[in-house]
Image (cartoon, helix red, strand yellow):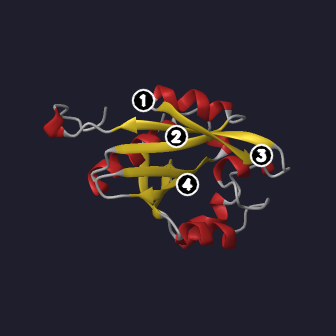
Amino acid sequence: MSDLHFRPVTASDLSVLCTFPRDPEELFFCAPRAEYPLTVEQLGGLIETRADSTVVEMEGRVVGFANFYRFESEGLCAIGNVVVDPDARGRGVASALIRYMTDLAYSKYVAQEVMVSCFNRNVAGLLLYPKLGFKPDSVEARQDYRGETVALIHLKKRVIHPRQGNARGIS
């Protein structure tokens, strides 16, 4: 895999990011309240209500995006709006992005826990997050874009701070 570069999102990134969800289902996975197709206005509105909106670049092009929808100092940080360019999927971008956001939660917010949520039909996410140390914590019923009941699975990872014995900071 090529080197990845992480940076804050800019207005010029939005139109590219809007192309990542290929259908209503993929958009639902990364932005459940948005309407397909994702627009710059919808994405901009989401970003305004969140913190640390971050893009990942590979070979000079934007290939991933995530942010925090919850960001408590010395508490819980929740990662949201995770999406990867379809052409870059399967190349480790999502793993690197989640690791980066987890490290950011620790370094900037001194988070005690990091959470990510995943719908039951998002098999790729459900297989990825446990590999990164996240464990299922709770499940809630939600309605999808078709009005069908789906399960939203919340997964958490406890952060171990250096004073607790782990020099790397993340458990």
Which residue does the image show at 70% across and 59% down from the upper left? 33
Mark 1 vs mark 4, CA separation in Å:
26 Å
Q: Residue 62: name its quadrant.
A: bottom right
Q: Secondary structure at mark 1?
A: loop
Residue contact between numbered discs 4 and 2, judged by CB atoms under 8 Å: no
Residue 144 location (% of width, % of height): 77, 48
Q: Amino acid at mark 4?
A: Val
Residue contact between numbered discs 3 and 1, judged by CB atoms under 8 Å: no
Which of the two labelled residues, at mark 3 and mark 2, occupies the earlier sequence position? 3
Mark 1 vs mark 2, CA separation in Å:
16 Å
Q: Secondary structure at mark 3?
A: helix
Q: Which residue is mark 1?
A: 133
Q: Which residue is mark 2?
A: 93
Q: Amino acid at mark 2?
A: Val
Which of the two labelled residues, at mark 4 and mark 2, occupies the earlier sequence position? 4
Q: Is residue 23 visible?
A: no
Which residue does the image show at 54% across and 52% down from the upper left? 80
Which dot marks residue 19? none
Q: Is residue 69 left or right of residue 76?
A: right
Q: Is residue 78 above or below residue 46?
A: above
